[in-house]
Amino acid sequence: MSDARDEAAECIFCRIVRGEIPSQEVARTAEAYAFRDLNPQAPTHVLVVPVRHAANLGDFVAAAERDEVGHVLALASQIGREASPGGYRVVINEGVDGGQTVHHLHLHVLAGRALTWPPG
Ligand code: AMP
């Protein structure tokens, strides 16, 4: 088995996508899965993840086929708009300095309150 397949077998978000770990589903397509964050930072806090395992945004973009990047962004936008007509925020953390703690690309969709800037 390749390293990438080993990584996907153990990855917590891959396991959520496969239904091996429970999650609160918000949306599912062939290429992406959206579910509620366990530790919400806003009234709506949804994570959008690509089904294909990629450790972070840079790795995902580097190996992207067709319009995979656009697809996950479009799903995040749809969820944000439906949750809050007044606006929403999409956040992607990468690496230690970016504050990334789970190493499968995920877009945080935050909505339902006025969000401050700059982030911490
Ligand atoms: P990040 O710090 O950008 O890597 O974000 C990881 C996010 O995943 C955090 O907001 C966590 O609360 C969230 N998280 C971790 N495990 C789970 C889980 N099993 N179900 C839902 N959200 C999770």
Image: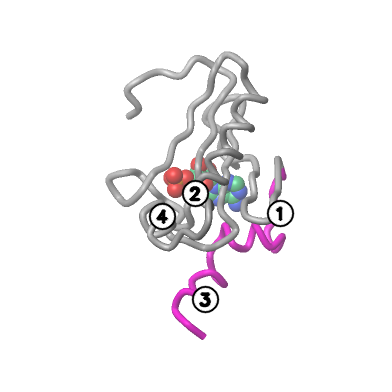
The dot on residue 61 is 4
Q: Mark 4 touching mark 3, by CB under 8 A?
A: no
Quadrant position of the C terminus in the picture: top left
Q: Position of residue 31 (x, y in %)?
A: 63, 55
Alpha-carbon span between mark 2 and mark 1: 25 Å
Task: Tell me, yes or no, whether the two marked residues, 2 and 4, touch with CB atoms within 8 Å.
Answer: yes
Q: Which mark is residue 64?
A: none
Which tag is nearer the camera, tag 4 or tag 3? Answer: 4
The image shows residue 28, relative to residue 2, as above or below, that is above
Identify which amino acid the numbered label 2 is placed on. Val
Residue 18 counted in the magenta span: yes
* SS at badge 1: loop
* First along the sequence among labels 3 and 2: 3
The type of residue carrying mark 3 is Arg
**Which residue is denoted by mark 3 in the rendering?**
5
Instruction: Name which of mark 2 and mark 4 comes first in the sequence.
Output: 4
Residue where numbered disc 2 is placed: 69
Tag nearer the camera, 1 or 4: 4
Q: Which residues are magenta?
A: 1-25
Seen at 36% across and 48% down, the residue is: 94
Q: Determine which residue is flagged by label 1.
A: 22
Disc nearer the start of the sequence (1/4): 1
